[in-house]
Image: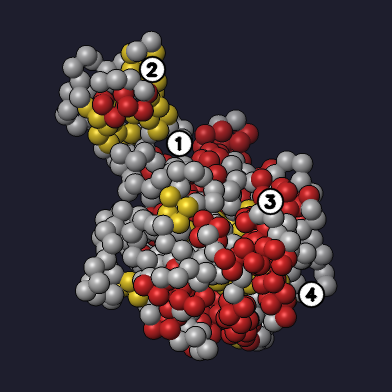
């Protein structure tokens, strides 16, 4: 009550800053469609009674709610499917509310109880996720926390997603993630209302799914040499080098993960990436290649075998493709798709299709003969021929066909859905052709890119800061929204040396993507989002999930002003001060504060910067060599 009295009086007096502070205590990610804060708070009693429908689909929702409330509070929790006096009620109300549809919910918290209603079990699950975000951050603790007032503000929330496809992709080929790590990934994504896990199961550096009719795929294809450093620059493994890095999921593992995801209302989209990105398959079954000598190939270990200097498609130095002119390839794909389709209940299978080099095909007599026979004029048409045959195979297994936007080249297969990654263009073209589209443009949604300057971040070939990620809109201008199924972020794993670093790369950009695919566009608000992210950092600290603090570090912009270097520093988070030194010592808030572009003193060798919020350091100490700035500005030393 005290808070509400303060809220009313401060709003009446027009003291917006205080009002905002109170509002800031509600930090739901993704932002709900409608949230009204009412007077008062609900305080959890010592004995917490929950009523929910006794459906098998809700077992995990009930377990999750019970676990969080008992572990963190130490209180007792009882669950039953009939208890009119329960303080928390989950109600399935299948006809009442059309607007919340299949995944939406209404959540009402009053001083006496909490009621979540939804049309479907998924809505109740999402209502529970929101409810937990209303409690203090300590609710994330796995041990009882003392001296916390376990309360939530009174609210009325109506919420439902903007898109039905809210995805995160994980590449388990370049880095193998264990079954437990995959489950943890799914756990966390579900808490932010993602509903699609895109499992990139095969690539040049490892085939990760057991296929019983082709055992070599995992006997040989799942193992590479263990290397440390920068992927793509590793030395070619010696013939004697042990191939001990890797792993794969047995079909029993896959079934377990599919069930685990289903209990969290997450579908799994399997990806079998062909005809390119197939070195692991070719090394296991060289007869699938057009190239003689493929029997000498080994699974990739992060050595470079692709020349990108001419752009798309790349020129391969080893033929990592399946041969479209070889009937054995279609027998192989038929058997693989039979097993994949039986394991994954989701309606789509993703077949890759990206970055397929054509230079070996150009030299192949078999491809030449195929081109004559099928009147194919270009290598793009050869790939399109392959994709169309593969679409038929996939459809024969009762599944829908999806690929990366390269499948547009040479003519799209009749029913194909396109996942747009090379910017938005492929998605725009496919939607104009009336094909379904999922947007995951690298420009907004490639969460393997660096989040800040490469002087401090582990190096990747591109940068995508949090504020740019937050600008992602899955519906590009001029496109009919009915063809856009939704959006997703992609976590490629070439530069992920560990699961901890994968978490660092995923969060907080995962929060931004969650909001872009769930919340109404007009509800997005960068400053409000940053405030919420900081609240969720506290939750991640308690859960010991790693995240990147890069949003607190400035962007360095090097300019050439008539041969003179000027350095601009830009913060993406408002209200931070950046302090700097040119004298090699570590700046703190008693050092000069950045206000305008800096011209380094003549003999300076290093710019050191750190951001503060008030009198607290918040960014990392960054040392930027002046020579590096000169190089970026195109100024000779
Ligand atoms: C991709 O990033 N090659 C789809």
Q: Which residue is mark 3?
A: 427
Residue behind mark 2: 560
Name the residue rendered at 31%, 53% in the picture: 233
What's the CA distance linking mark 3 and mark 1?
Answer: 31 Å
For label 3, the crowd category at 10 Å Cα-Cα, with few meaning under 14, some 14 to 19 and many 20 or more, is: many
Q: What residue is rendered at 36% in x and 23% in y?
A: 634
Viewer-side label of 2, 1: 2
Which is nearer the N-term, disc 2 or disc 3? 3
The disc placed on residue 573 is: 1
Q: Label 2 to label 1, Cα distance in Å?
A: 26 Å
Q: Residue furthest top?
A: 562
- How many C-alpha atoms fall within 10 Å of the one at disc 4: few (<14), some, or many (≥20)? some
Mark-to-mark CA distance, 1 and 4: 43 Å
Mark nearer the N terminus (3 vs 1): 3
**Disc with the residue nearer the chain's start (4 vs 3):** 4
The quarter in which the C terminus is drawn is top left
Whether the residue carrying mark 4 lies under 8 Å from ligand 1 is answered with no
- Place of residue 93 in the rendered image (x, y in percent of width and height, measured from the top left): 77, 74
Q: Earlier in the sequence, mark 4 or mark 2?
A: 4
Q: Are marks 4 and 2 in contact (CB under 8 Å)?
A: no
Q: For the residues carrying marks 3 and 1, which lies nearer the camera in this image? A: 3
Q: Nearer the viewer, residue 104 or 308?
A: 308
| Sequence-first tag of 2 and 1 | 2
């Amino acid at each position: 009550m005290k808070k509400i009295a303060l809220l009313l009086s401060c709003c009446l007096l027009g003291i917006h800053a205080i009002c905002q502070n109170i509002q800031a205590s509600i930090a739901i990610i993704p932002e709900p469609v409608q949230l009204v804060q009412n007077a008062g708070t609900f305080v959890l009693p010592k004995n917490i009674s929950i009523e929910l429908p006794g459906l098998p689909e809700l077992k995990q929702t009930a377990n999750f709610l019970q676990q969080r409330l008992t572990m963190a509070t130490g209180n007792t929790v009882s669950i039953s499917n009939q208890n009119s006096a329960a303080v928390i009620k989950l109600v399935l109300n299948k006809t009442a509310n059309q607007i919340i549809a299949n995944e939406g919910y209404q959540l009402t918290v009053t001083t006496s109880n909490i009621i979540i209603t939804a049309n479907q079990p998924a809505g109740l699950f999402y209502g529970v996720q929101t409810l937990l975000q209303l409690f203090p951050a300590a609710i994330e603790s796995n041990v009882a926390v003392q001296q916390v007032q376990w309360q939530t503000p009174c609210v009325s929330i109506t919420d439902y997603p903007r898109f039905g496809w809210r995805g995160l992709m994980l590449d388990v080929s370049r880095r193998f993630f264990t079954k437990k790590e995959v489950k943890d990934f799914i756990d966390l994504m579900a808490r932010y209302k993602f509903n699609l896990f895109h499992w990139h199961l095969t690539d040049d550096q490892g085939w990760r799914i057991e296929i019983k009719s082709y055992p070599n795929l995992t006997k040989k294809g799942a193992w590479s040499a263990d290397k440390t450093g920068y992927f793509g620059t590793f030395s070619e493994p010696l013939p004697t080098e042990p191939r001990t890095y890797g792993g794969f999921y047995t079909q029993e593992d896959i079934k377990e993960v599919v069930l685990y995801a289903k209990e969290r209302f997450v579908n799994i989209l399997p990806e079998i990436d062909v005809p390119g990105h197939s070195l692991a398959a070719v090394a296991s079954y060289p007869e699938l290649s057009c190239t003689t000598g493929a029997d000498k190939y080994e699974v990739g270990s992060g050595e470079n075998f692709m020349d990108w200097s001419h752009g798309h498609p790349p020129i391969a130095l080893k033929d990592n493709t399946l041969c479209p002119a070889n009937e054995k390839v279609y027998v192989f794909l038929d058997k693989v798709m039979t097993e994949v389709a039986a394991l994954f209940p989701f309606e789509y299978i993703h077949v890759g299709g990206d970055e397929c080099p054509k230079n070996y095909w150009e030299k192949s007599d078999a491809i030449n003969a195929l081109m004559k026979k099928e009147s194919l004029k270009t290598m793009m048409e050869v790939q399109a021929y392959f994709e169309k045959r593969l679409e038929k195979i996939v459809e024969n297994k009762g599944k829908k066909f999806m690929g990366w936007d390269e499948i547009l080249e040479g003519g799209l297969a009749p029913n194909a859905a396109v996942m747009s990654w090379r910017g938005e263009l492929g998605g725009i073209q496919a939607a104009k052709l009336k094909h379904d589209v999922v947007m995951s443009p690298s420009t907004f949604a490639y969460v393997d890119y660096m989040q800040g300057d490469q002087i401090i971040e582990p190096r990747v070939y591109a940068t995508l800061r949090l504020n740019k990620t937050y600008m992602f809109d899955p519906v590009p201008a001029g496109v009919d929204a009915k063809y856009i199924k939704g959006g997703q972020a992609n976590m490629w794993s070439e530069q992920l040396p560990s699961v901890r670093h994968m978490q660092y790369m995923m969060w907080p950009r995962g929060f931004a993507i969650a909001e872009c695919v769930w919340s109404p566009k007009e509800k997005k608000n960068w400053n409000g989002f940053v405030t919420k992210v900081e609240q969720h950092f506290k939750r991640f600290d308690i859960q010991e999930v790693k995240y990147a603090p890069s949003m607190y570090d400035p962007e360095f912009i090097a300019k050439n002003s008539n041969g003179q270097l000027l350095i601009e520093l830009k913060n993406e988070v408002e209200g931070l001060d950046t302090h700097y030194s040119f004298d090699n010592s570590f700046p703190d808030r008693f050092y000069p504060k950045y206000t305008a572009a800096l011209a380094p003193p003549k003999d300076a060798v290093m710019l050191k910067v750190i951001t503060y919020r008030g009198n607290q350091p918040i960014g990392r100490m960054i040392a930027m060599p002046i020579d590096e700035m000169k190089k970026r500005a195109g100024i000779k030393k």
